[in-house]
Image (cartoon, rainbow, N blue to C red):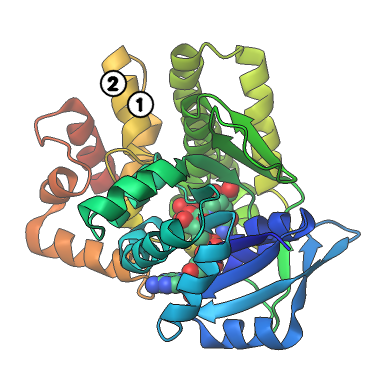
Amino acid sequence: MKKAVHFGAGNIGRGFIGALFSQSGYNVVFVDIADQIINQLNEEKQYNVMLATDEKETITIQNVSGLNNLNQENEVIEAIKEAAFLTTAIGPNILPRIAPLIAKGLAARVQANEERLYVIACENQISATDLLKGYIMEHLDEAAKEKVLANVSFLNSAVDRIVPIQNNQGSLDVLVEPYHEWVVETSEGIPHIEGMKIVSELAPFIERKLFTVNTGHAVIAYFGYLANKETIDQTLADEDIYNQVKATLGETGTYLINQYNLDPEEHQKYIDKIINRFQNAHLNDGVTRVGRSPIRKLGHKDRLVRPALQAQKAGHSYTNLAKAIAAALLFDYKEDEDAVKLQIMIQEHGVPYVLQEVCELEESSELAKEIISHYEELKR
Ligand SMILES: NC(=O)c1ccc[n+]([C@@H]2O[C@H](COP(=O)([O-])OP(=O)(O)OC[C@H]3O[C@@H](n4cnc5c(N)ncnc54)[C@H](O)[C@@H]3O)[C@@H](O)[C@H]2O)c1
Ligand SMILES: O=P(O)(O)OC[C@@H](O)[C@@H](O)[C@H](O)[C@H](O)CO
């Protein structure tokens, strides 16, 4: 049976990417540090993916197993030697940590098996696979690098499916929204995977997704958190926040329509569909999950700052994006490591320093000034 090695047996791993490989006839080896999940995968050898609909349709995912990358290095390397695909859904910040083991696996793979291997990082980050490739290359000598570059394809991708934190301790089953989209950039003829869409240029797809789904999500999460809301759908029921989301997606929409020559009516339909997805009460998706890792989300190329800068450059409105950035700076959720770090940075050095260090925005820029003024207002 064909094999796919997938790093990250979490929500997207089990609920989306691993599930698609299994449904396409692959044996899926999940690699993770969570012993409980790994042991359960090996014992139960299957799990259910449930759709967040009234009917709760269920699909059983089979031919799955697990390995722990902390204490089963050799087994992971052996699995990589036989795999047709190597994918990740682990969080962008974790990619550098798994790169040394992937490098060992790839070095052994290209010696043992001449078949092409496809590596795809499925993270919410522009060019995540290119970044992973760079981290992997740091751990290969010149000879191995050359062989890996000749035999392994590194393909960027965009993944879209809302998978909340699961409310079923001790179970492998995953509740997911019915909608899903997985777009992979390549001009090669790669093996067919159910649900994978191939495109020759990813930029319009990943920017449209990141600056609509994830920007909208971030606005709801940060304003919802400030308004003491628990979930995304509850937050959207607040008329002011709903209008704020619409206005912000109007700003990112103007950029996306101009940049990628999108049809404005089609783009409006895309926005409406996404807002409808956010309103799915079956998901029970927490604002703290969606707002997680605010330092990452405030990055220069991420869902808030990049569209704001693009709007500023084009002379369009970015007021609502600036407000959302200010709200993100107030996300002081104590159980999120990044949020704690961000608040310490603000207390010790102030907001202008954070805008410079995290968002790469000069204090004197119009955008930075506007964020600071919204921040002061929201704090009151
Ligand atoms: N959940 C969603 O709705 C969604 C949708 C699209 C994209 N994504 C992206 O998918 C990625 C994963 O998100 P998620 O929601 O599935 O997160 P998650 O926390 O549910 O899953 C991450 C998994 O990675 C594992 N992990 C952490 N550190 C590890 C390490 N060093 N080695 C091996 N495994 C490790 C964790 O144990 C966990 O099982 C993120 O980049 C996210 O942005 C998520
Ligand atoms: O995964 P993050 O932390 O980058 O973003 C949180 C959510 O916006 C995200 O997980 C969405 O649910 C997902 O991107 C939908 O496709």
Q: Is residue 354 visible?
A: yes
Residue sitting at x 24%, y 61%: 342
Q: Is residue 155 above or below residue 367?
A: below
Q: Amino acid at mark 2?
A: Gln
Residue sitting at x 17%, y 40%: 360
Image quarter of the N terminus = bottom right
| Residue 322 at x, y percent in the picture | 32, 35
Residue sitting at x 64%, y 72%: 166
Q: Does the residue tagged 1 have its C-beta within 8 Å of any atom of ligand 2?
A: no
The quadrant holding residue 301 is top left
Q: Is residue 290 visible?
A: no
Q: In terms of depth relative to the viewer, which is nearer, 229 or 219?
A: 219
Horizontally, residue 190 falls left or right of residue 293, namely: right
Mark 1 is surrounded, within 10 Å at the Cα level, by few (under 14), some (14 to 19) or many (20 or more) other residues, namely: many
Q: Secondary structure at mark 1?
A: loop
| Residue 95 at x, y percent in the picture | 36, 60
Callouts 1 and 2 close, C-beta under 8 Å: yes
The label shown at residue 318 is 1
**First reached walking from the N terminus: tag 1 or tag 2:** 2
Q: Which residue is mark 2?
A: 312
Q: Is residue 133 above or below residue 79?
A: above
Q: Secondary structure at mark 2?
A: helix
Mark 1 to mark 2: distance in Å?
A: 7 Å
Q: Amino acid at mark 1?
A: Tyr
Residue sitting at x 54%, y 27%: 187
| Residue 175 at x, y percent in the picture | 73, 65
Horizontally, residue 149 falls left or right of residue 275, namely: left
| Residue 158 at x, y percent in the picture | 53, 41
The label shown at residue 132 is none
